[in-house]
């Protein structure tokens, strides 16, 4: 029964993390296309307006949307050397504790980034060139961080094991 | 409690977290926020953390990283690495250790379109190891060559490490890229020399390949055309002042994708794999950069980096002794901590020391890259060795580590040459500036 619940949770978490990562792929593709268009159009004296801004915005979404999938696939750099020498039980406890602390950190980041975004919205902050509102992009970052927090929480409960590596 | 004391506690806590396997980026973020909160206030710390994250993730100058990684990933999935190796093999495969030297040449060629050491090692291991096995090369030589050759990925431009170093020290990424070219070529030759010597001394480790006709050799050259075109387009535009680094990377990624699609070397699945792998690697790198930025703000208010810089700068030692100590620290540190994480942790501390001693910052960047190349192939962390092992599953880790030992001397020799003759790195940037 427990293993069935585990498998289901694992599947759901992996599904959402992967979908968000596809979003990161789309924003990455947009970065590439905007940059190339800007360079080509510059030769015809018609650069893409606000290309730098757009590339920066999409860059932030690329990283934020990839955070959960990277965490789920254990893609972040960590020093295994010492912990791998510990007995398995202690190793697991440390892993879970790490995941729980990281989940808390990203919970706080999510909360603070939402507050920051509401501040940007309230003060009508817009970008310099295109004059587009800035808050949707920081909300995108907050969503990415929220997803990491959930992934890490489930990893600390040992429910989301190695979603991506096992796909 | 003095700020310095809080700073020291913070650094200790950081190392404990890192060695307890917390992801390096997250550990730096946590330490930075906690330390800043202890000295200033929790609300100021949270505000600093969010601003840093939003700034780093959305930084235009850092968007160069995902775009260059994408270029390398598309190149790999399109089989450019295979063609590079095939050309190199046809030209020098019949020489002593020819196939291994061809693998080093292919690593150098692939490094010209890929900025990461692990990606280069993984790519070239997948391409060249089965061939070397077929020709009965010893596992020690074959795997050692790929692990060491893959490290060229961060020396020959584009290079993720140069980009990150350039961003944190505010040095021109274009100049750093240029400074890496000649040391990269020298190191390629040194690696080849070591392999040739090895093959002459132990011919059973590297049986000679078949000699190819001149016609075959010449017709094979089409296999390097796309790499040359892409390198010239990207680096030419960058060095010629036509592009910013981000634009060069964007155009490079686009050009590689279009070339691969036109030549039907990549399908939808290959492209999707290239994109997903790029987002994963970029996220990993930029999380470390964001964590290091938050940590940097904490360390700045503790004044520790400036105190260390002042103390070291005031030591009554010749500057070459101090630089040698710094290099030794990088060599030892590189054995335990990933190259990127080590650079993010230490450059803010050592950079002011190095510049106050009058060393050229671009030269120092190249030296650091060379030294971290040692770190990526030495135990216990040696990322490239693990990457090669993940491809060569039947080869023991010890065998690969044994194989990289002779090639380590090549990197040490290149580093020594660079220290004695800084113009090896500085000649090209200075020449281009004229």
Image: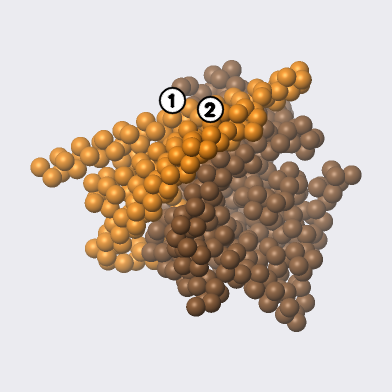
Chain colours: A orange, B brown
Q: Position of residue B349 (x, y in %)?
A: 63, 65
Q: Look at discs 2 and 1 and give the one toward the viewer.
A: 2
Residue furthest to the front:
A123
Residue furthest to the bottom:
B316
Q: Which residue is mark 2?
A: A29
The 10 Å Cα crowd at callout 1, few under 14, some 14 to 19, many 20 or more, is few
Q: Position of residue B422 (x, y in %)?
A: 79, 59
Tell me whether circle 2 and circle 1 mark residues in contact (CB < 8 Å): no
Name the residue rendered at 25%, 36% in the picture.
A11
Q: Could you tell me which secondary element the residue under label 2 belongs to?
A: helix
The vertical placement of B394 against B212, above or below, is below
Name the residue rendered at 76%, 73% in the picture.
B319
Q: Which residue is mark 1?
A: B269
Q: Is residue B59 found left or right of B156 in the rendered image? A: left
State the CA–CA distance, disc 2 to disc 1. 15 Å
Q: Position of residue B126 (x, y in %)?
A: 49, 40
Q: Could you tell me which secondary element the residue under label 1 belongs to?
A: helix
Residue B34 in view here: yes
Nearest to the observer: residue B251 or residue A149: A149
The vertical placement of B80 against B164, above or below, is above
Residue furthest to the right:
B434
Q: Position of residue B401 (x, y in %)?
A: 50, 59
Asked where in the image residue A33 lies, by quadrant, the reply is top right
Query: What chain does mark 1 sit on?
Result: B
Name the residue rendered at 68%, 77% in the picture.
B311
Q: Is residue B374 found left or right of B270 in the rendered image? A: right
Name the residue rendered at 65%, 49% in the picture.
B167
Residue B216 in view here: no
Is the same chain shared between marks 2 and 1?
Answer: no
Rendered-image quadrant of the C terminus of chain B: top right
Query: What chain does mark 2 sit on?
Result: A
């Amino acid at each position: 029964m427990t293993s069935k619940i585990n498998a289901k949770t694992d599947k759901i978490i992996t599904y959402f993390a992967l979908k968000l990562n596809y979003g990161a792929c789309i924003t990455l593709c947009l970065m590439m296309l905007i940059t190339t268009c800007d360079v080509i159009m510059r030769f015809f004296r018609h650069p893409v307006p606000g290309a730098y801004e757009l590339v920066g915005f999409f860059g932030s979404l690329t990283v934020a949307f990839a955070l959960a999938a990277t965490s789920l696939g254990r893609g972040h750099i960590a020093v295994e050397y010492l912990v791998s020498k510990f007995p398995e039980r202690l190793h697991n406890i440390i892993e879970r504790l790490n995941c729980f602390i990281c989940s808390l950190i990203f919970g706080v980041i999510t909360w603070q980034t939402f507050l920051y975004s509401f501040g940007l919205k309230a003060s009508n902050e817009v970008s310099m060139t295109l004059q587009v509102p800035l808050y949707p992009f920081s909300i995108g970052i907050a969503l990415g961080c929220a997803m990491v927090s959930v992934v890490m929480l489930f990893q600390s409960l040992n429910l989301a094991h190695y979603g991506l590596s096992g796909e | 409690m003095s700020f310095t004391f809080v700073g020291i506690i913070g650094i200790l806590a950081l190392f404990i977290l890192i060695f307890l396997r917390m992801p390096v980026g997250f550990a730096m973020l946590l330490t930075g926020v906690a330390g800043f909160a202890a000295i200033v206030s929790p609300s100021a710390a949270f505000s600093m953390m969010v601003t840093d994250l939003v700034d780093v993730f959305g930084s235009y100058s850092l968007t160069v990283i995902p775009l260059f990684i994408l270029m390398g990933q598309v190149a790999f999935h399109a089989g450019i690495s295979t063609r590079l190796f095939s050309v190199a093999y046809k030209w020098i495969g019949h020489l002593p250790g020819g196939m291994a030297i061809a693998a080093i040449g292919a690593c150098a060629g692939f490094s010209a379109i890929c900025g990461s050491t692990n990606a280069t090692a993984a790519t070239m291991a997948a391409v060249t190891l089965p061939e070397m096995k077929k020709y009965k090369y010893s596992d020690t030589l074959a795997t050692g060559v790929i692990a060491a050759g893959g490290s060229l990925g961060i020396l020959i431009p584009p290079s993720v490490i140069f980009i990150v170093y350039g961003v944190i020290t505010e040095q021109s990424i274009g100049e750093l890229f240029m400074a890496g070219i000649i040391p990269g070529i020298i190191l390629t030759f040194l690696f080849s020399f070591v392999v040739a010597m090895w093959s002459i001394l132990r011919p059973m480790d590297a049986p000679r390949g078949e000699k190819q006709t001149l016609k075959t050799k010449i017709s094979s050259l089409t296999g390097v055309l796309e790499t040359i075109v892409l390198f010239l387009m990207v680096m030419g535009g960058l060095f010629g002042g036509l592009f910013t680094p981000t634009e060069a990377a964007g155009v490079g990624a686009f050009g590689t994708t279009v070339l691969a699609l036109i030549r039907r070397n990549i399908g939808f699945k290959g492209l999707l794999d290239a994109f997903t792998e790029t987002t994963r690697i970029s996220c990993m790198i930029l999380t470390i950069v964001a964590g290091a930025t938050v940590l940097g703000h904490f360390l700045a208010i503790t004044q520790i980096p400036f105190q260390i810089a002042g103390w070291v700068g005031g030591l009554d030692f010749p500057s070459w002794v101090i630089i040698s100590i710094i290099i030794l620290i990088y060599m030892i540190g590189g054995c335990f901590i990933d190259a990127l994480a080590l650079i993010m942790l230490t450059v803010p501390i050592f950079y002011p020391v190095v510049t106050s001693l009058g060393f050229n910052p671009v030269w120092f960047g190249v030296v650091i890259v060379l030294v971290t190349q040692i770190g990526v192939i030495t135990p216990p962390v040696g990322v490239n060795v693990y990457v090669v092992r993940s491809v060569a599953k039947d080869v023991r880790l010890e065998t690969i580590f044994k194989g990289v030992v002779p090639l380590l001397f090549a990197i040490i020799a290149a580093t020594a040459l660079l220290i004695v003759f800084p113009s090896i790195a500085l000649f090209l940037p200075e020449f281009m500036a004229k």
